[in-house]
Image (cartoon, rainbow, N blue to C red):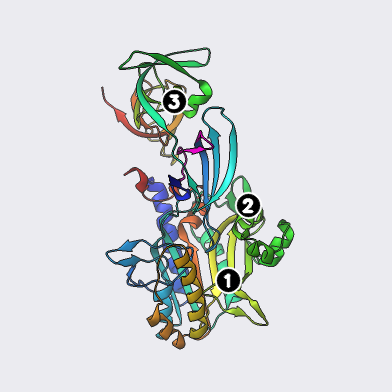
Amino acid sequence: MLSPRSLRQRSQLLQAIRSFFLNRDYIEVDTPIRLPVLLPEAHIQPFTSDGWFLQTSPELCMKMLLAGGCEQIFQLCHCFRKEECGHHHQTEFTMLEWYHRGWDYVDLMEECEDFFNTLAGKVSGLDGVNRKGEIFYKGRTISLEKPWSRLSLRDAFRNFSDISVEQAIAEDQFEEILVEEIEPHLGWERPVFLYDYPIQLASLAKVKQDTPDLAERFELYIGGLELANGFSELVDAEVQRERFAQEMMTIRRLGRDARMPEHFLQSLEGLGDTAGIALGVDRMSMLLQGKEKLTDILPMDVRFM
Amino acid sequence: MFSASDLRKGLKIQIDGEPYIITDFQFSKPGKGQALYRTKMRNMITGNQFTNTYRSNDKFEKPDLEERTMQFLYAQDAEYHFMDTTSYEQRFLSKEQLGDNLSYLVDNMEVQVLFFGERPIDVSLPTFVNLEVTTAEPWVKGDTSGTDTKPVTVETGFQLQVPPFVEQGDKIQIDTRTGTYMTRVKE
């Protein structure tokens, strides 16, 4: 259980998140968390709930709201992912997602910079932020001053690993190399955006112009920690259907089942250029509250109930 | 059989016929990719440590371990002697084998000793133990420094954070899984 003091810090963070987006004309939405169908994602396992599912992210519902005419929306909600449990994972966690029509992933990176600076500057008494608005994590000081570093995934493999990203994927070593050789180096001077992911690792992201094997997707890293995943949204229903079919093949190969979210695919036609991002609120709070484990900042630790 | 998703700190698995205990464990899942289980473990017989990274589809055997209820008698030359409460047989474990459990172990405490064949290899303590506070700073009423805990030392030499009202001589209940203060015990 959190002390009243830590609970207050968390409460102030949630308030600051809301005011940041409300000040920028976003609408706060609260979509259902229990759904009859989810977006098929190969390596994300949902919990079932009386024949339906608990959401693994609010992406499906939020994109349908955008297709229905919303321009800018954000949501703070709980998400559930089976078997994800560790210092930096919880099966139930708090997600922040926001979407902006007419934008691409580069616009979102800039908004991320403003978002963190506003939070670190506005919320007083955060244990992980010093007077200069820098993050203090694992004994090191990380400046949030703009602009943050931008590093393509291809260059990251070139800099920190012996093999290329293409080779890593072909040899089924992508995750191991990313986690063990690359992530530990990312975001210690300033936060880093790792960007342009191979298309097979970005089933909901738009193809990068002129480079059909890459998708406009980025991940934000601070102090070696992955905090947010954003992209220019894939809005072509036919391409999306093919990507989902690929994901569903993998899901079935892994012994699970999934069905095509037809209603979602139909609604994609109403969605013009859009960028969207998902950010782990608990990890961010952990960082800003100067802790190294999620269980140190969660209001309740359900393991010992 | 265990699968990689069962791995957690303290779990015992068998590799090549020998029992191992997971001493550190990190779950990773880089952006929508496959889950990785980075695992540090100790051979429970030789004490050798090693690390490995597993994926969800990796499987492990359960070691064939037997639990016996034993009472802690005394320590001598880094050997910790226990007595079986039904057969009165005495056996000892080394300081290394006891590891962090030493923070909570006091004379006459009943524990579960794990045997691999005839070898005692580990103990598991009660989830909650009551220990006496041997050193504590007095609580200054009206202290407004904002800290809501203070450090104390208990009879085993273990240090932990407790609420400011806990005083020297108090008995407190500690959760041995986390090493955290639960409550003050009235006797």
Label 2: which residue? A180
Magenta stretch holds residue B124: no
The residue depicted at 46 percent of the width and 41 percent of the height is: B61
Q: Nearer the viewer, residue A247 or B73?
A: A247
Mark 3–mark 2 distance (CA, rounded to whole Å): 37 Å
Alpha-carbon neighbours of circle 1 within 10 Å: few (<14), some, or many (≥20)? some
- Amino acid on which the number 1 mark rests in the picture: Gln
Query: In which quarter of the view is residue A84 placed?
Result: bottom left
Quarter of the C terminus of chain B within the rendering: top left
The Cα–Cα distance between marks 2 and 1, rounded to whole angstroms, is 21 Å
Which residues fall within the magenta stretch? B7-20
Residue A268 is situated, as x and y percent measured from the top left of the image, at: 45, 84
Crowding near pointer 3: few (<14 within 10 Å), some, many (20+)? few
Residue at which label 3 appears: B117
The count of marks equals 3
Quadrant in the rendering for residue B48: top right
> Label 2 marks which chain's residue?
A
Q: Vertically, is B99 above or below B35?
A: above
Q: Chain of mark 1?
A: A
Residue hosting label 1? A200
Quadrant where the N terminus of chain B sits is top left
Query: Picture quarter containing residue B142?
Result: top left
Contact, mark 3 vs mark 2 (Cβ under 8 Å): no
Dots 3 and 1 on the same chain = no
**Amino acid type indicated by mark 3:** Gly
Local packing at callout 2 (Cα closer than 10 Å; few below 14, some 14-19, many 20+) is some
Q: Secondary structure at mark 2?
A: helix
Residue B167 in the image, given as x and y percentages of width and height? 37, 25
Q: Up-down: is A149 above or below A242?
A: above
Height in image: B11 above or below B93? below
CB within 8 Å, label 3 to label 1: no
Q: Secondary structure at mark 3?
A: loop
